[in-house]
Amino acid sequence: MINESRRSQRRNVHESVIVFDTMTEQAIGRVGNISESGMLLVASAPLCEDALYQLRFEIIDRTGRVVPIDVGAHLIWLGSANTPGQSWAGLRFLTLEESQLAVLRQWIARSDPRT
């Protein structure tokens, strides 16, 4: 049995949630999994380990409204993915507005993203 030691509930993201670097307005990858304190990014752009990023992605709240989520994030680790041109990146959120955090928490807690 795997003992989960993370403090925050984590959601595996099966739908395509594209992540943008707000400084360059470029798509840098997609969310692999996410918690209220960070995410696994499946990166499709070159990233720098131990760097700070301003990121944006969109999720759908429980009313069906698209909500942009803006985060300041620290890239903690970077690793090679099996797909050429992609890498795995572990990011810790540093800044996140309280209203967006509340929507993110609800989205993470839902077992079915359509509910």
Image (cartoon, rainbow, N blue to C red):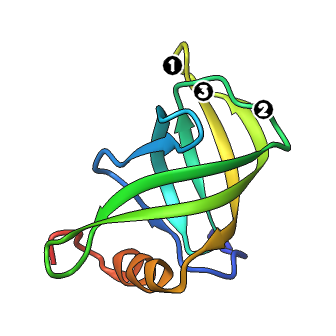
Instruction: Name the quadrant containing residue 102.
Output: bottom left
Q: Which mark is residue 81?
A: 3
Task: Determine crowd level at label 1: few under 14, some 14-19, many 20+ residues with C-alpha closer than 10 A.
Answer: few
User: Element at badge 3?
Assistant: loop
Distance, label 3 to label 2, CA atoms, is 15 Å
**Numbered tag placed on residue 94 in the rendering:** none
Disc ID at residue 48: 2
Q: CA distance from mark 3 to mark 1?
A: 5 Å
Q: Amino acid at mark 1?
A: Thr
Q: What is the number of the mark on residue 83? A: 1
Q: Position of residue 58 (x, y in %)?
A: 34, 57
Q: Quadrant of the C terminus?
A: bottom left
Q: Earlier in the sequence, mark 3 or mark 2?
A: 2
What element does badge 2 sit on? Answer: loop
Vertical comparison of 24 with 51: above or below: above
Place residue 89 in its image quadrant: top right
Along the polypeptide, which appears first: circle 2 or circle 1?
A: 2
Q: Three-letter amino acid code at disc 2?
A: Cys
Q: Position of residue 12 (x, y in %)?
A: 43, 59
Q: In the orientation shown, which residue stands out farthest toward the top?
A: 84
Q: Are marks 3 and 2 in contact (CB under 8 Å)?
A: no
What's the residue type where badge 3 is placed?
A: Ala
Query: Which circle, 2 or 1, is nearer the viewer?
Result: 2
Cα gap from disc 2 to disc 1, whole angstroms: 19 Å
- Residue at horizontal 49 percent and vertical 57 percent from the top: 33
- Depth order, front residue of 98/8: 98
